[in-house]
Image (spheres, grey):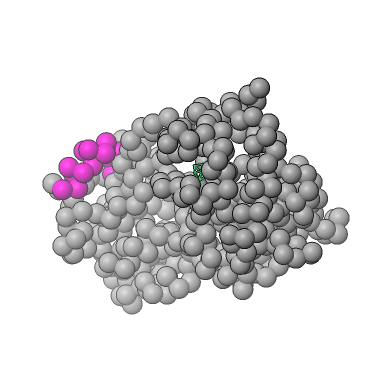
């Protein structure tokens, strides 16, 4: 009789042994965070790598992980580090809220260790750590502590929706629940860490998004999507609306010493806690209009007079700078570059495309002193640094790196 997962009992029971056999011979065993070959796993390593891998691929994570381990070999080192140092280590990997949570989580873990003498030992205790969701907590339990733990991350969901032909929208909670039930049913009580590692490997190396390598797959003989030749129809996801676009001028305000003004972004919001050039947001436009505007008149973007946009998009520092520029009738000019004259730098975030137009303004010593005083009076975190020093010492988002490389 079919189970609720469209898969009979026999394949359900043989799923884990087949996967583990495949992993033993063909899986990856040399990733620096893997703990399945040691009797004394290190939860710190698994936690750190899992947070990094949440939205980033293995090959991108590898050098970041190595640098983090070099600078912060223990959770105590990470907890004691300055935020700016962590931001600088994370810069370029995107989804910066993860770095914030990592820092906060390290402090929470140190508190737990100081209180109990060890890392959290239960799923619920790990889920209480900042930035740790149910799948990350399951991975840490299974791989970082060698206890029972279940994972159901994006890779696992892809494998399972294909194998069991689960055709509900994976962004819906009913489908997520169904997938968790199936993941729990398939995870062996013994060796759940090895199983988690094998599932991750399957999703990353065989059952990949665009062209799954079914010929080498240990689940091929009972994979429903494969039998139907519909592998890439899964997972089913409702069509997303096209992302809106936003335009900003990125102000390169330079003093007499060729140093540029950098502002630390507020903790909440885009690039929280990182450093950026002052930005001037301009009227929100649709994707099509944005393209047309970029093509037609990239230098004539006007700062929005829409109060709501102004309030929500500008930081206090940017409001001060914007008003100061207007009072002094100072105008920044587009950076002369044929590429940028045609199209501003495009940066895509999860919820919108962002077109950034670098604009440069050189100010004299009297003006930079005046601006310093205004920013200091408002307790704004700012620095004057040349581009190279900023790149070397500040946590800069990737879009800012693109701009200073122009
Ligand atoms: S047979 Fe193909 S689609 Fe099915 S689980 Fe294996 S790799 Fe994925």
For the record, the magenta segment spans 282-295
Point 42% across, 75% down: residue? 389
Q: Quadrant of residue 24?
A: bottom right
293 or 207: nearer the eye?
207
Q: Main secondary structure of the magenta part?
A: helix
Residue 265 seen in the figure: no
Residue 286: image location, x then y, percent: 27, 36
Is 345 positioned to the left or the right of 226 in the image? left
Closest to the observer: 160 or 388? 160
- Where 386 sits versus 315, above or below? below
* Vertical placement of residue 364 versus 61, above or below: below
Q: Residue at x 31, y 59 (%)?
A: 251
The residue furthest front is 221
Q: Is residue 85 magenta?
A: no
Quadrant (top left/top right/bottom left/bottom right) for the C terminus: bottom left
- Given residues 285 and 321, the one toward you in this image is 285
Instruction: Kindly identify the residue that appears in the image at 33 percent across and 48 percent down.
Output: 354
Q: Position of residue 298 (x, y in %)?
A: 18, 50
Nearest the camera: 372 or 86? 86
Q: Position of residue 321 (x, y in %)?
A: 35, 55
Q: Quadrant of the N terminus?
A: top right
Identify which residue is drawn at 65% across, 25% down: 3
Seen from this angle, which residue lies furthest right? Answer: 116
Q: What is the residue that sits farthest to the bottom in this orientation?
A: 257
């Amino acid at each position: 009789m079919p189970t609720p997962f469209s898969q009979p009992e026999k394949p359900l029971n043989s799923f884990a042994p087949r996967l583990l056999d495949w992993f033993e011979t063909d899986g990856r065993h040399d990733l620096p965070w893997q703990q399945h070959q040691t009797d004394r796993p290190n939860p710190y390593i698994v936690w750190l790598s899992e947070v990094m891998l949440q939205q980033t691929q293995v090959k991108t994570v590898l050098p970041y992980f190595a640098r983090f381990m070099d600078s912060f070999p223990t959770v105590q080192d990470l907890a004691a580090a300055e935020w700016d140092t962590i931001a600088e280590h994370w810069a370029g990997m995107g989804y910066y809220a993860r770095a914030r949570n990592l820092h906060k989580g390290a402090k929470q873990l140190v508190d737990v260790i100081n209180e109990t003498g060890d890392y959290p030992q239960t799923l619920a205790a790990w889920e209480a750590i900042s930035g740790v969701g149910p799948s990350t907590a399951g991975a840490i339990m299974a791989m970082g502590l060698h206890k029972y733990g279940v994972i159901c991350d994006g890779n696992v969901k892809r494998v399972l929706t294909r194998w069991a032909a689960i055709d509900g929208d994976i962004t819906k909670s009913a489908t997520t629940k169904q997938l968790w039930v199936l993941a729990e049913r398939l995870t062996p009580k013994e060796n759940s860490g090895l199983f988690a590692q094998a599932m991750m490997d399957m999703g990353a190396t065989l059952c990949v998004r665009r062209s799954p390598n079914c010929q080498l797959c240990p689940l091929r003989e009972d994979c429903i999507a494969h039998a139907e030749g519909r592998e890439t129809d899964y997972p089913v996801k409702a069509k997303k609306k096209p992302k809106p676009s936003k335009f900003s001028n990125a102000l390169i305000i330079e003093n007499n010493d060729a140093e540029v003004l950098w502002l630390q972004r507020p903790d909440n919001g885009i690039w929280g806690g990182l450093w950026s050039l002052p930005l001037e947001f301009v009227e929100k436009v649709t994707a099509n209009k944005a393209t047309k505007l970029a093509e037609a008149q990239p230098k004539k973007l006007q700062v929005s007079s829409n109060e709501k946009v102004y309030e929500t998009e500008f930081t206090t520092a940017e409001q001060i700078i914007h008003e100061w520029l207007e009072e002094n009738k100072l105008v920044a000019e587009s950076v002369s570059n044929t590429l940028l004259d045609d199209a501003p730098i495009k940066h895509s975030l999860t919820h919108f495309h962002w077109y950034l137009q670098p604009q440069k303004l050189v100010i004299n010593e009297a003006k930079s002193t005046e601006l310093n005083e205004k920013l200091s009076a408002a307790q704004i975190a700012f620095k004057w640094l040349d581009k190279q020093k900023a790149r070397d010492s500040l946590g800069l988002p990737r879009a800012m790196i693109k701009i200073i490389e122009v």
